[in-house]
Structure formats: structure tokens, C-alpha cells
Image (cartoon, rainbow, N blue to C red):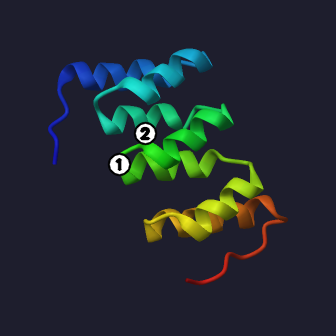
Amino acid sequence: MQKITFTQKYARRRLKKLTDQEVLADIVINDEYYFIRGDAVKKLTDQRILADIVKNDKHREVRQAAVENLIDRDLLVDIMKNDSDKDIRITANKRLAIIINKIEPCQQ
């Protein structure tokens, strides 16, 4: 487990106040710490960047947070069917169920 430094705690505190989507996107794409990227991705609304994060980030937690913010049904179905990580597929299934009239997700 990675130890969080004072600077990282400060960064997380400042991140809570951020709303600028360009700054958030920069953090999500470029920050070296997965937990900072994960916090930023939760506030990101740009579907194109979220899709890129789901496909390319190396950490499951960041990818799951991105899936939880997606609204593109076709993309969620694609992730649900094709992602190599079972947990990401399950998260996509749950997110799709929420979007489609709050239907219960299928069991995998």
C-alpha cells in the first residue's frame, strides 16, 4: 500500500474544490497517483475522456470510477461484454441498469 504524504493529502483537499473540467481532465490523465486520478475522475463529466480512462488507465479503481460516470449506453454495453476485467464488466452492467429505469443488474 502506498503511503500518502502531506503534499498528497493537500492535493486531495484542493481537488475537492475543483470544478474546472479542463483541470480535472489534466489531473485524470497526467497525475502519477492513482488515488488522486480516482478522486478527479469522479468529478469529470467529459464522456470522451471517461471512455479513454476506462480503456487505458492501469488501476481498476480509476477505471471503475470512470465507468460509474458514463452515460453512453452503447459504450457501457461494449465494456460489459468485452472488458478483460470482470469487476469492470460488473460495474458497467450496474451503471447501465441505473441508466435504464433503475432495473436490477444481471448476475454474472
Residue drawn at point x = 16 percent, y = 41 percent: 2
Q: Residue furthest bottom?
A: 107
Q: Is residue 7 above or below residue 40?
A: above
Residue drawn at point x = 74 percent, y = 49 percent: 72
Front residue of 64/74: it is 74
Which picture quadrant has residue 75?
A: bottom right
Residue drawn at point x = 66 percent, y = 31 percent: 46
Asked if residue 69 lies left or right of residue 84, the reply is: right
Image x and y of residue 45, in percent: 66, 33
Image x and y of residue 79, in percent: 59, 61
Image x and y of residue 59, in percent: 35, 48
Front residue of 78/100: it is 78
The residue wearing badge 2 is 38
Bin the neighbour count of mark 1 within 10 Å (Cα to Cα): few under 14, some 14-19, many 20 and up.
Answer: some
State how far apart marks 1 and 2 are (Cα). Answer: 9 Å
Residue drawn at point x = 17 percent, y = 26 percent: 5
Q: Give SS at disc 1.
A: loop
| Residue type of the residue flagged with mark 2 | Gly
Bin the neighbour count of mark 2 within 10 Å (Cα to Cα): few under 14, some 14-19, many 20 and up.
Answer: many
* First in residue order: circle 1 vs circle 2: 2
The residue wearing badge 1 is 59
